[in-house]
Every structure is written in C-alpha cells, then in structure tokens.
Image: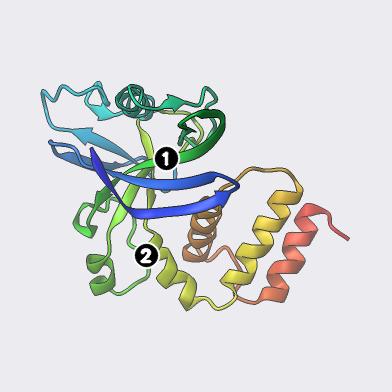
Amino acid sequence: MGSTSEYLRKIGNNEYELHLNIKFPFKLTPIRDDERKGFVMLKAEENVKHPAIWKGFLNRAALKGWIRNMLKPKYVPHNSLNSYDDLNIKFYRVFNENANICLHIWPMVEFDYSKWPLPAPKLPESTLKALPWYAVPQMTTPIDQRSFMAWSPEWERCIMEMNPQSQKVRILMMDVMSCMDIPYPEDVIQTLLVQAMLEEKMPTDLDLFLSGFCRDLKVT
C-alpha cells in the first residue's frame, strides 16, 4: 500500500503521528485547483477502477475508507473523524484492552517537481527538482472531496531558512491559536506561513509584523 519510512513522531502520551506515502499502480496527474489556493486535484488515467477513485479523481473520503477497510481485519478504527482528514487508529494492547496506542495516519501521494501545477516557489530550480512534494488530504472551503493540499516540507524548510524571523512568527502563531483553541496542526501553520512569505504578505521586520498581528487580534 505504501511506505511508512517518511515520518513518525510522538505527539502525546501513547499517541503518535505517521505520514504514510501511498503508491498506486496507476498514474495520477495533479491539476491546479483554481477555487482553492495552494490545492490540487489528482486525475486518474482513463478507465481506472479503484476504491479510492471516484468519477476519475482521487477522492479524500474514498481514500480514507479504502485505507480503513484494509486495516479493519487487524485494528480497531477510532470512530471520530476530524476536519484534517487524517485517520485515527487505536491499537489495543494484548491482554489489556483498557491500554491502547492511538496512531494518527496522514496518507499522502508523492510527486516530483515536473508534476508541480502551481506557481513555482522562489527557490533554485536545482533545489526544487531534487526534493519531492506531496498531495495531502486537507479539508478546505468550498468543500470538494477531490481537493488535496500541495505540500513540500523540504521546500518549506529551505524557504524558512531564507527568512530568519519566520521561526519566531511560527511559534507565535501556534501559541495564539492554542490560546484561542483553534486546533491547527503545526505542519499546516508552517505551510500557511510559507504561503504568506511567498506572496510577500508577511513583513520581514518582526516588530512590524507583531504590531499588525496584535492590532488585528485586538490585543493590548
């Protein structure tokens, strides 16, 4: 089904996050989603029949259902769904069903730069070609189950390194959203921050950014 070697981290007590790189036996072509900035749709080849494909496109809900059905024989899926389109799977320990490990699975599809359908980031072409990007299930508005977020953590890391104040701003955004009880994953916050830098919407001067940020939040 895919590789689990990309990313695994502990995010809480007996709770882990896993990035699962899904590999399909057919070609998917990323197409720019004009209604959702930074998002793509993944068009399958003609006459492809697969549980994750619906009306010619990879479908987020169908993808989640396909993965859940394959895991059901061995594992007990958590019943709750959330707005970030991950899979919450609980692994029950043998001889003790009250103790469990919760694994948040984030399925994603890998592409190289030649398949990138969005405006090119401000990075050397050699860097873009050397590092992959991923289509990740992520809810957005207007809702369309064919829409996937275009995400490249390595590209983002390079862009963040080019902007020395970006880490401080990222920490600030995470703390503010935590105080406001807005459950945004760290990866999504970083992606939004990088998009703001690429569009030159975020001032490079930290004091100028903070003054505007606090004003918008009505912080005194």
Residue drawn at (37%, 28%) of the image: 64
- Residue 76: x percent and y percent? 44, 24
In the image, is 114 to the left or to the right of 146? left
Q: Which residue is mark 2?
A: 154
Residue 103 visible in the displayed image: yes
Q: Quadrant of the C terminus?
A: bottom right
Q: Quadrant of residue 212?
A: bottom right
Q: Quadrant of the N terminus?
A: top left
Choose the circle earlier in sequence order: 1 or 2: 1
- Residue 55: x percent and y percent? 24, 21
The amino acid type of the residue labelled 2 equals Glu
Residue drawn at (66%, 58%) of the image: 173
Identify whether 49 is placed above or below 44: above
In the image, is 178 to the left or to the right of 67? right
- Residue 215: x percent and y percent? 79, 59
Secondary element under disc 1, as helix, strand or loop, is strand
Q: Which residue is mark 1?
A: 105
The amino acid type of the residue labelled 1 equals Ile
Residue 137 visible in the displayed image: no
Secondary element under disc 2, as helix, strand or loop, is helix
Q: Nearer the viewer, mark 1 or mark 2?
A: 1
Residue that extends furthest to the front in the rendered view of this protein: 95
In the image, is 163 to the left or to the right of 38? right
> Mark on residue 92?
none
Identify whether 215 is placed above or below 136: below
- Residue 38: x percent and y percent? 42, 48
Residue drawn at (47%, 40%) of the image: 104
Identify whether 170 is placed above or below 56: below
State the separation of the CA atoms marked 1 and 2: 20 Å
Q: How many marks?
A: 2
Identify whether 193 is placed above or below 204: above
Q: Quadrant of residue 138?
A: top left
